[in-house]
Amino acid sequence: MLLVSGVSLFGSNMRQARAIEVNLVGNGGFELNSDWIWSDVSGRVTNDSYSGSYSLLLSSACVQASQSVTFPNLTSHYFGFKYRPSSGFRGSVIIEDSSAHSRLELEVADGSIVSTVGELVSNETLQNGWRGIVMRFTPSFPQMMLRLGQNSGEAHFDDVHIGEDPPPDFHVNPSPAPQNWDLLKIPVVTGLVVIGIIGGLAYWVLAKRRGKK
Ligand SMILES: [Ca+2]
């Protein structure tokens, strides 16, 4: 009840700030030994992470990590994750319902995206070989399965996120290019200053001539 009154008091900004914090993926940063069903516990590693101390390493030792995701609203959602593939990594990330009628899929090979089912929103290069992916999709069922899978090679995964708002720290909406009037602003202001100086000088010269007469 307190939460509802808080949202109504502070309006949409408050609601937006709260929504960004919601990650429907449990333990998306792999910092805890919980939530995920790993094909092998060796998948949770500390030798390389994007944030925190842990990440998931998919390899021939641990070919899959999955978890059930509950969607309170069947509205548009963002799915984001960061990954660092080694040469030869081939794998896929899938969100689907039990009958696979509703499906989001992204398949990567050697660090490149080879196929998608769903809208790819951003695919950016981060530091130290890490990449960031954001996709948008609308779940059809309140309960769906998220699977990160390996076919060959190995790759680290971190910061797995599903929410109604873009994941924090992802650049989903790059800054818009400056408008033309922004580029014109400097010459226009300079021109006005020059006109002002010339006008002032002319007034001073005229005033001086009148004073001599
Ligand atoms: Ca982490």
Image (cartoon, rainbow, N blue to C red):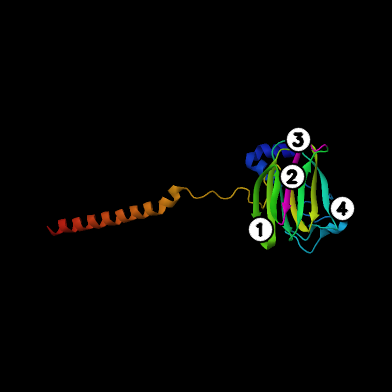
* Sequence-wise first label, 4 or 1: 4
The answer to whether residue 102 is magenta is yes
Closest to the camera, between mark 2 and mark 3, is 2
The spot of residue 110 in percent (x, y) is 72, 57
First-in-chain label (2 vs 1): 2
**In the structure shown, which secondary structural element does the residue marked by tag 1 occupy?**
loop
- First in residue order: circle 2 vs circle 3: 2
Judge whether residue 190 can be spotted in this image: yes
Mark 3 is on which residue type? Ser
Query: Which residue is identified by label 2?
Result: 105
- Where is mark 3, residue-wise? 140
- Does residue 40 lie above or below 15 as drawn? below
Q: Which of the numbered marks, if any, corresponds to residue 126?
A: 1
Q: CA distance from mark 2 to mark 3?
A: 14 Å
Where does the magenta region start and end?
99-110
**Front position in the image: 159 or 97:** 97
**Nearest-to-viewer mark from 4 and 2:** 2
Q: Identity of the amino acid at label 4?
A: Ser
Name the residue at 71% across, 36% down: 75
> Is the C-beta separation of discs 2 and 1 under 8 Å?
no
Which residue is farthest right? 40
**Label 1 packing within 10 angstroms: few (<14), some (14-19), many (20+):** some
Around disc 3, counting alpha carbons within 10 Å, would you say few (fewer than 14), some (14 to 19), or many (20 or more)? some
Residue 42 percent across, percent down from the top left: 86, 59
Mark pair 4, 2: CA separation: 20 Å
* Outermost residue, bottom side: 47
Q: Are marks 2 and 3 in contact (CB under 8 Å)?
A: no
